[in-house]
Image: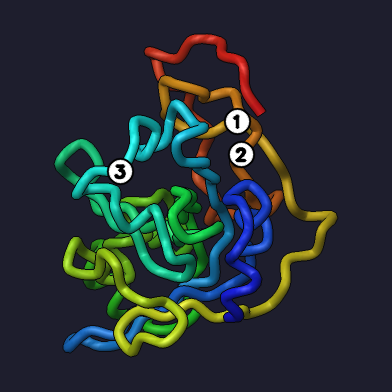
Amino acid sequence: MNVDLLAHPAEEVAPKLLGSVLTCKTPEGTVSIAITETEAYSGTADPASHAYRGRTPRNAVMFGPAGHLYVYRSHGLHWCANVVTGTDGIASAVLIRAGRVIEGEDLARKRRGEKVESPRLARGPGNFCQALGITGEHNGADLLTGTSVMLSEGESAPAALIQVGPRVGVSKAHDWQHRFYLAGDPTVSAYRLSPRAKPSAGA
């Protein structure tokens, strides 16, 4: 993966990451997942972004440089993985919402549960991280030159299959068209509107 591909606003990079592959190597083994669903978060310009109110110790990785992994805990339960994009110093990141396991399926199923069907192994951002073995220890990892978590280009997604829609489960700026996914792919998560969501102005 070339850093130049990531050095753009999140909403431009998010659809381009569809088909890319995220790989995580742990002592248990290696799992690789082809990305099928993403969401863009535009930093201080985005009310739904962790960086909306500025830099903090928690969100510092979001401010760059591009090509690093921003990992956070959602609702105290699940790890979520984001690819940092844009210009160094300006917060921008793409949340990886879902994918298809292409390597290490047995290990992914061990982590997720033996009865979990293949399309559901990495469906949803928390499940994606669990299947890969990503935790808070990977926050800040270099995805381009690192050896534990790596992002590679994979197969480009056909433009005709890329769908755009509102983001899932956020209460602020939920109606921004910043969710990108592959139409008809069984690994893509279901759309869910937050019960706290209100109409908003946005991109």
Q: CA distance from mark 3 to mark 2?
A: 22 Å
Where residue 145 appears, as percent x and y from the top left, is 42, 87
* Mark before the other along the chain sequence, 3 or 1: 3
Residue that label 3 marks: 55
Residue that label 2 marks: 178
Q: Are marks 1 and 2 in contact (CB under 8 Å)?
A: yes
Q: Nearer the viewer, mark 3 or mark 1?
A: 3
Where residue 43 appears, as percent x and y from the top left, is 46, 41
**Would you call the spot at circle 1 few (<14 residues within 10 Å), some (14-19), or many (20 or more)?**
some
Residue at image position (32%, 67%) is 131
171 vs 186, left or right, is: left
Q: CA distance from mark 3 to mark 1?
A: 25 Å
Name above or below for residue 79 compared with residue 34: above
* Mark before the other along the chain sequence, 3 or 2: 3
Q: Secondary structure at mark 3?
A: loop
154 vs 137, left or right, is: right
**Dot label at residue 166:** 1
186 vs 156, left or right, is: left
